[in-house]
Image (cartoon, rainbow, N blue to C red):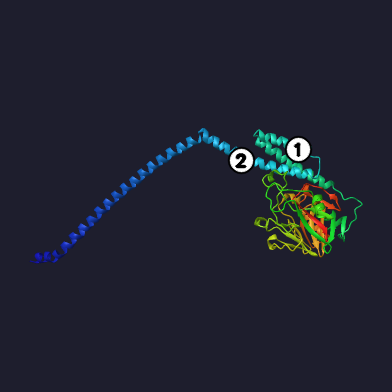
Amino acid sequence: MKIKSALSYFKPLHAPLKLLTFLFALVLVVSVVINISQKKENDKLALELAETKKTLDVHIEELTALKKEDQYVKNKQLEETIKNIEDTYKQSVGMYEKLLDLKGKTKEVEDLDTLFAQALTYLSERNYASGAATLKSIGAKILEKDQEIASTFSIPVNVVQSNAPPGAGYKRQTVKAEIGEYLVDIIAADLNSTRVIVDTASDGDCKNDCPVSSLADYASRSGAFAGINGPYFCPADYPSCADKKNSFDTLLMNKNKVYFNSDNNVYSSVPAIIFSGGSGRIVGQSLEWGRDTGVDSVIASQPMLLSGGNNVFGGDDEPKRGTKGSRSFVGSSGNMAYIGVVHNATVAEVAYVLKSLGLQSAINLDSGGSTALIYNGSYLIGPGRNTPFGILFVSK
């Protein structure tokens, strides 16, 4: 009786225990099935990855073979040839233009002409390494020539030393600046009796094959008693100017009140000097100036040398401005206008010289082969190359 009673006590627990055992077995089976399934999936991915790698290897082999084919090799060789031609052409053009600039200072360049011809021969034979080396050698020799010319320049002993500009007319003088002594040819004019104008060979904007004339012609047809070459332009004898021969980019108003390059925003940051009535003024950027035709002239050029009597140019990264040569300028102070040339000077040195002369405003003009200064019908310097414009002094 007691044993039966005991079994009766445990009987209610027997059903849940069976259920628990069943659930445990079910979880175990599901887990095994999932693991088997995951392994199959991983194996499948691994197989697909292996097949993909085989396909990639085949494509790589095909690409490698293609690169070895003649046409591909020829195309790569052609690309290299084109690059060599482009690079050496740019070097040749730059060196030729440096030679032209040097010829404006000295006639002793026959050896350099011979070397340049040799460089061109190398390039025509596709010997780019020798051509480039020869051009580099020419550049070094041009620098030596420039330094030799500068070192042998001397101021004539009979030139008077004076740091005061002439009250009127022309004067050749030695100016003692804080950085040394410099020879200066300068012409002064009272703006109460003189107008500063610009004469141009073209009647309006011109982008290529533009007309040019000599400074003497500009002075003669405008009735000017003095004149100087204008700002930078693109000379026809420069290869880099082939598609813009004798053109210029900066703002200018000529004697006929015509504005040139009025829409050229690329160069609107270039400073400008404006002459009107009895005074001259300068603006740091030509974009600051409107299109007023009531003034006598507007001339944009670079760099600005003086503003408010202060030296505002200490040099830049333009190599040509850092070499010594004859540098032309236009400036003003009060009711006086000045044009002139500082000899054997860098552009930065010109700023020092003009400050020592007491000018208030001044800008640099084109130099080198374009340099020209005329007074009473005679060239003091030049005549230089023909240019698209001339800056002139005419009596009122």
For the point 10% across and 64% down, the residue is: 3
Q: What is the crowding at mark 1: few (fewer than 14 residues within 10 Å), some, or many (at least 20)?
A: some
Above or below, 39 against 69 in this view is below
Q: Earlier in the sequence, mark 2 or mark 1?
A: 2
Q: Judge left or right: residue 87 versus residue 141.
A: left
According to the picture, the residue beneath numbered tag 2 turns out to be 83
Badges 2 and 1: C-beta atoms under 8 Å apart? no
Residue 316 on image: x %, y %: 72, 54
Mark linked to residue 113: 1
Residue 138 on image: x %, y %: 73, 40
Q: Can residue 182 be seen in this view?
A: no
Quadrant assignment, res 97? top right
Q: Judge left or right: residue 361 versus residue 376.
A: left
CA distance separating discs 2 and 1: 25 Å
Along the viewing direction, whichever of 256 and 261 lies nearer the viewer: 256
Residue 30 on image: x %, y %: 25, 53
For the point 71% across and 38% down, the residue is: 134
Residue 188 on image: x %, y %: 84, 59
Q: What residue type is labelled 2?
A: Lys
Quadrant assignment, res 330? bottom right
Q: Is residue 46 visible?
A: yes
Q: What is the crowding at mark 2: few (fewer than 14 residues within 10 Å), some, or many (at least 20)?
A: few
Q: Residue furthest right?
A: 158
Q: Which amino acid does label 1 sit on?
A: Asp
Give the quadrant of the C terminus: bottom right
Along the viewing direction, whichever of 104 and 298 lies nearer the viewer: 298
Give the quadrant of the N terminus: bottom left
SS at circle 1: helix
SS at circle 2: helix
Mark linked to residue 291: none
